[in-house]
Amino acid sequence: MRARIAAFAAVVALASLIPEAAGDGAAPERRVLVIPLAGQLPGIHAGAPVRMSGDLVDLIGRSGPQVVRAPADDVLGLVGCAELSDHCLVQALDIFQVSDVVAGDVAAVSAKQVRVRLRLARSSRPVRSKSFLVPSDTPAALEAGFRARAAAFWRDPDAVDLSPAQAAPPAGSAEEPRAPVDSTVPGFSAGRVSGLSWALAGSGVGLAVLGGLALVAAADKQADVDDAPTDTVDDLEALADIEKKGRRYARWGAGLLIAGAAATTAGVVLIVVQGTERMGPETDGLSAAPRSAPGLSLTLAAPPGGVGAILTVQARR
């Protein structure tokens, strides 16, 4: 912990003393953290991600803010994240004391096109994300196309179209361009829900049904108690046995019903949370580290004189 605090202090001090870019030599109005673009490109574009990251720093600096550049690994280590998720970018705003954080990644989609995704975290605003295609016939074309679209994204990250140049791919290309993806738009998708969440909700319904059946059986036993004869000792012993079974059915029925309701509620909550989770990198065809599934466990217990259930839910990281 002390080593992390020391590293953080060093990074903040370095960022405040050695800005990478500033506009017109004037005091900057705000500070922007730029994380170099992730991803690799083949062939003649192998060094393009590094150049594109420099272009991003340059165009943001020319617009006025003071720009600080930090590698993704350093940001993840200081923020304590496993991946550059939207939540991690938002945390970096406070850790690095900046007003904006810009990150992104690149991937080749064909011999003639490169897909670029840029993300912007800004104080008191949701994280904005846009994907766009850039012609990559030559390194110069790739650089020019990226600068134009990156500048448009920086000027207006909420624009529907970053550039009129997002047209059809070159003739003969099997890759069709896709519309820009805005990862800040929530929506329910069953595909984002863990199978364990569905199983929890279904199991809860099943337990509740079993509990209801047990309570019905307990009611039947109570009816038998009401109609049972009490003339002889044998009749009284039979009556006591019926009452004992009725109480057992009632305890198990109530316990199963409560456990089923709890499991169903937890399952439905997880389904809603996961299904409406903010769309991340995996939704626009770019690689991302998988998130761990939620851990769930339901344990029934039968202590003396009652029935209990323990439901444990560990949220997804």
Image (cartoon, helix red, strand yellow):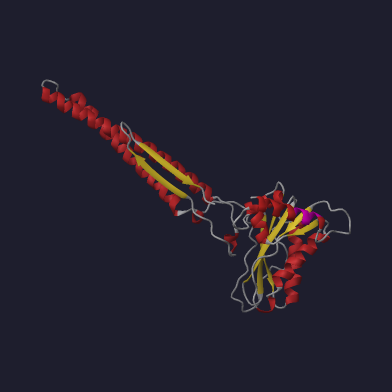
In this picture, residue 236 sits left or right of residue 248: left
Residue that lies at the very extreme toward the top in this rendered image: 231
Q: Relative to the observer, which residue lies in front, 37 or 147?
A: 37
Q: Whole-percent x and y of residue 226?
A: 21, 24
What residue is drawn where x is 64% and y is 76%?
A: 42
In the rendered image of this protein, does residue 123 appear above or below residue 229? below
- Horizontally, residue 230 falls left or right of residue 97, namely left
Q: Give the image quarter of residue 48.
A: bottom right
Query: Observer-nearest residue: 286 or 36?
Result: 36
Q: Main secondary structure of the magenta part?
A: helix
Asked whether 15 falls inside the magenta stretch, the response is yes
Is residue 184 something one can see in this rendering?
A: no
Note whether 178 is above or below 203 in the view shown.
below
Q: Is residue 186 magenta?
A: no
The quadrant in which residue 236 appears is top left
Expressed as whole percent of the image width and height from the top left, the position of residue 46 reads: 68, 75
Please state the horizontal and vertical placement of residue 83, each as a whole percent of the image: 60, 58
* Image height of 252 relative to 44, above or below: above
Image point 53% across, 47% down: which residue?
Answer: 273
Please give the name of the residue rendered at 62% of the width and 66% of the height, measured from the top-left corner: 178
Which contiguous range is marked in magenta?
12-16
Residue 143 rendering spot, x and y as whole percentages? 75, 71
Q: How many marks?
A: 0
- Does the rendering let one see residue 267? yes
**Residue at image point 40% right, 40% down:** 310
Q: Residue furthest front?
A: 2
